Amino acid sequence: MYTIKTLNAISPVGLAKLPKNLFEVLVDSDAPDGVLVRSANMLDTEFKPNLLAIARAGAGVNNIPLERCSEQGIVVFNTPGANSNAVAELVTGMLIAGSRNLAAAAQWTAGLKGDPDMAKNVEKGKKQFVGGEIKGKTLGVIGLGAIGAKVANNAIHLGMEVYGYDPYISIEAAWSLSGKVHHCVNLNDMLPLCDFVTIHVPYLPTTKDTINAQTLSLCKDGVRILNYARGELVNNDAILEALDSGKAGAYLTDFPCEAVLGHPGVVCTPHLGASTPEAEDNCAEMAATEISDYLRNGNITHSVNMPEVSQPRAGGKRICIIHKNEPGMISQITGLTTAGKLNIENMVNKSKKDMAYTMLDVTGAVDPQIAQKLAAIPAIIRVRVL
């Protein structure tokens, strides 16, 4: 029986993926085997030695201490793509809302309540909010992952000309992308072409302020910038200056902050991107499936700090080893299994930066002390025999 602690309200759809005969799900547990979390801050959490995995029901993991988890052999999962449809739909809607000035128009119209000449003033006042159609306009998409690809495809269906920039696009994302999306090899080529620019990349030191004074200077006058990925991807001073000068026509973002709220041309929503029941169900279901498969079978899928390793069970016992990515590890591991007269039916080893994961399916009489013998190897962090 594995104990799973939930740090936030996790969708029952996800929890249903944890069979009650194998998992005990608790809100309060001092020493869980696994943790399901959404936004709770775990950066200062002390982890007990038996904690094996943390699954984040969402994509971002900035609330989890990844380096410390790796040092303690704790696998951290996220759920990439599970909320992509929710975010992509919102961005697509905001493309239209931004082009038609809907937020400002709705706010102005609300002020007509009680006006005896409402009908007359509506016709008179609407001229200040006239916008354009997005059909035939050009959209630039920075980042063509699960969300960016969906936004690009939606825009194609709405009749837009779409350019995409992503130097790290995955094969899976490339297959899902419409063939009508034009590929750009650098932002300098793409930005001058675009009436709208939307950004969908993770927040890293290298992506901070991707939209800045220099990149904005390359854009068309009146460009509309959409940011539904992370607030730090757009430099606030630069975008506000661009709005004031007319270089930017609008900034639509899901990340409120003191600097941008209330500024003319800014449309700010309260982090609604993935806030749909469907997205929460999808994220919880994926997170629960990932943590269940790892605890029960040792398979790692969608980990942010460990390599992805997955294979069917081949009978007998399965030995799962988290270790440093150092030379000679395989020979040391197989040397001990050979000395223990174990036959290796299947073996897989993969690395991710400084970390590595080796999984062996073995037959034969497994020495109950094999885990201790393997753990005695200096570079090995955690050993499990399933």
Image (cartoon, rainbow, N blue to C red):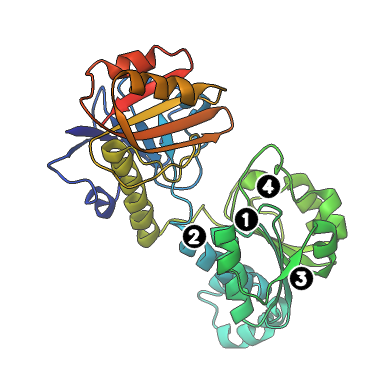
Comparing marks 3 and 1, which lies closer to the viewer?
Answer: 1
Q: Amino acid at mark 1?
A: His
Quarter where residue 267 is shown: bottom right
Say few, some or many: other residues with alpha carbon within 10 Å of mark 3 (under 14 / 14 to 19 / 20 or more). Answer: many
**Tag of residue 200:** 1
**Tag of residue 233:** 4
Q: Earlier in the sequence, mark 4 or mark 3?
A: 3
Please state the horizontal and vertical placement of residue 123, each as a whole percent of the image: 64, 87
Q: Nearer the viewer, residue 250 or 322?
A: 322
Please state the horizontal and vertical placement of residue 305, each as a whole percent of the image: 50, 34
At a point 49% along the width and 17% down the height, the residue shown is 379
> The residue tagged with tag 3: helix, strand or loop?
loop
Q: CA distance from mark 3 to mark 1?
A: 17 Å
> The residue tagged with tag 2: helix, strand or loop?
helix
Comparing marks 4 and 1, which lies closer to the viewer?
Answer: 1
Per the image, the residue denoted by label 3 is 195
